[in-house]
């Protein structure tokens, strides 16, 4: 199965080798037919501490690195 790739914005880089990425998705509500924005935060592995708050990054699924990290940052 191919690994999922998502694009989002770094919202926190306070932890060592970890960034928190907020990924926003848009979809049409099935009844109201209105466009809705939902966001979800993912914790991703950033080995070189290269990314700062506000950067747009792409993250890819990987094997579990820690209790909360299942994603890794792809170099942009």
Image (cartoon, grey):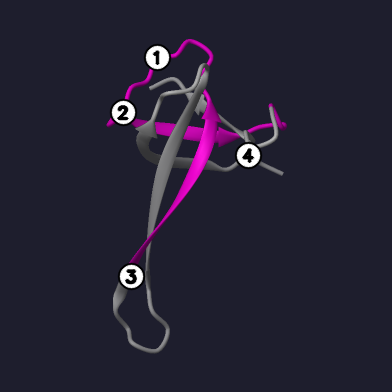
Mark 2 neighbour density, 10 Å: few (under 14) some (14–19) many (20 or more): some
In the image, residue 58 sits, relative to residue 37, either above or below, namely above
The residue positioned farthest toward the front in the image shown: 14
**Residue drawn at (32%, 83%), measured in percent from left and top?**
33
Instruction: Count the numbered circles shown.
Output: 4
In the image, residue 48 sits, relative to residue 31, either above or below, namely above
Residue that badge 1 annotates: 50
Which numbered disc, 1 or 4, marks the residue that appears first in the sequence?
Answer: 4
The mark lying in front, picked from 1 and 4, is 1
Q: Which residues are magenta?
A: 36-65
Q: Could you tell me which quadrant the N terminus lies in?
A: top right
Residue that badge 4 annotates: 3
Q: Estimate the x, y position of residue 20 in percent, counting from the top left.
A: 45, 35
Q: Secondary structure at mark 4?
A: loop
The mark lying in front, picked from 3 and 4, is 3
The answer to which quarter of the image holds residue 7 is top left
How far apart marks 3 and 4 lie (CA) works out to 26 Å
Q: Is residue 14 left or right of residue 34?
A: right
In the image, residue 60 sits, relative to residue 41, either above or below, namely above
How far apart marks 1 and 3 lie (CA) works out to 32 Å
Which numbered disc, 2 or 4, marks the residue that appears first in the sequence?
Answer: 4
* Image marks 1 and 3: residues in contact by CB distance under 8 Å: no
Q: Nearer the viewer, residue 58 or 2?
A: 58
Residue that badge 3 annotates: 36
Determine if the magenta segment contains residue 42. yes
How far apart marks 2 and 1 lie (CA) works out to 10 Å
Mark 1 neighbour density, 10 Å: few (under 14) some (14–19) many (20 or more): few
Q: Which mark is residue 53?
A: 2
Q: Estimate the x, y position of residue 50 in percent, counting from the top left.
A: 40, 14
The residue positioned farthest toward the top in the image shown: 48
* Image marks 2 and 1: residues in contact by CB distance under 8 Å: no
Mark 3 neighbour density, 10 Å: few (under 14) some (14–19) many (20 or more): few
């Amino acid at each position: 199965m191919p690994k999922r790739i998502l694009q989002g914005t770094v919202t926190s880089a306070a932890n060592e080798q970890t960034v928190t990425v907020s990924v926003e998705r848009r979809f049409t509500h099935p009844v109201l037919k209105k466009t809705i924005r939902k966001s979800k935060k993912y914790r991703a592995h950033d080995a070189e501490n290269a990314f700062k708050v506000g950067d747009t990054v792409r993250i890819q699924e990987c094997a579990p690195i820690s209790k909360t990290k299942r994603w890794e940052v792809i170099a942009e």
